[in-house]
Amino acid sequence: MKKNKFQNKYRIPSARATWWDYSNDGLYFITICTRNQETLFGEIESELVILSPIGKIVEEEWLKSFSIRNELYCEEYVIMPNHIHAILQIKNNGNEPVETHGRASLQGVAYRPPKSISSFVAGFKSAATTKINQY
């Protein structure tokens, strides 16, 4: 019997389709949540989200992410007090997709295909966390 990593203590089951390559061209709806759903990004006042200093850092890093990734576009996003919702688009613009098959040494728990949604999310989280920790 296969045990779940961390006995489900730290992770929830993935909602990702195992049969889909998340570096394919297309539109993707994503949600990124804070740890333990902490309200770090701001507060809601009169039906508007007022970003905290941390929320402003997150928004700055979010927008910067799309200026450094030629294949990724942000169609819409909203930063809520404890999460971000977004619709992202991957357009490879006629470029050949990055080969990810046949690289068994790179496949594993931490492997993220280049130019993929998971690679973007990991990079964004890392950049935002670094900036927040410097704050």
Image (cartoon, grey):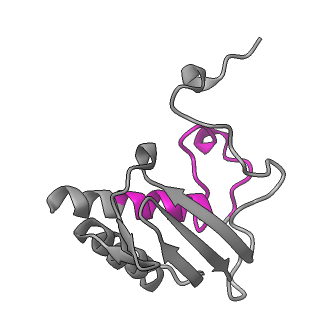
Task: Name the spot of residue 39 as percent of width and height, x first.
Answer: 37, 56
Q: Nearer the viewer, residue 63 or 118?
A: 63
Q: Please indicate whether residue 114 sits to the left or right of residue 122 in the image.
A: right
Q: Please indicate whether residue 26 sits to the left or right of residue 131 in the image.
A: right
Confirm whether the magenta stretch covers residue 114: yes
The residue at the far top in this view is 1
The image quadrant of residue 29 is bottom right
Residue at the spot 67% in from the left edge and 17% down from the top edge: 3
Residue at the spot 53% in from the left edge and 25% down from the top edge: 9
Task: Name the spot of residue 84 as percent of width and height, x first.
Answer: 50, 66
Q: Please indicate whether residue 86 sits to the left or right of residue 58 in the image.
A: right
Q: Nearer the viewer, residue 83 or 46?
A: 46
Above or below, 64 relative to 38? below
Q: Please indicate whether residue 33 sits to the left or right of residue 58 in the image.
A: right
Above or below, 130 relative to 2? below
Task: Name the spot of residue 96 as percent of width and height, x first.
Answer: 71, 77
| Residue 97 visible within the image | no
Residue at the spot 57% in from the left edge and 46% down from the top edge: 111
Task: Name the spot of residue 131 as percent of width and height, x first.
Answer: 24, 64
Q: Nearer the viewer, residue 67 or 100?
A: 67
The image quadrant of residue 13 is top right
Q: Quadrant of the N terminus?
A: top right
Q: Nearer the viewer, residue 23 or 75?
A: 75
Residue at the spot 46% in from the left edge and 68% down from the top edge: 80
Range of magenta residues:
99-126
Confirm whether the magenta stretch covers residue 118: yes
| Residue 26 visible within the image | yes
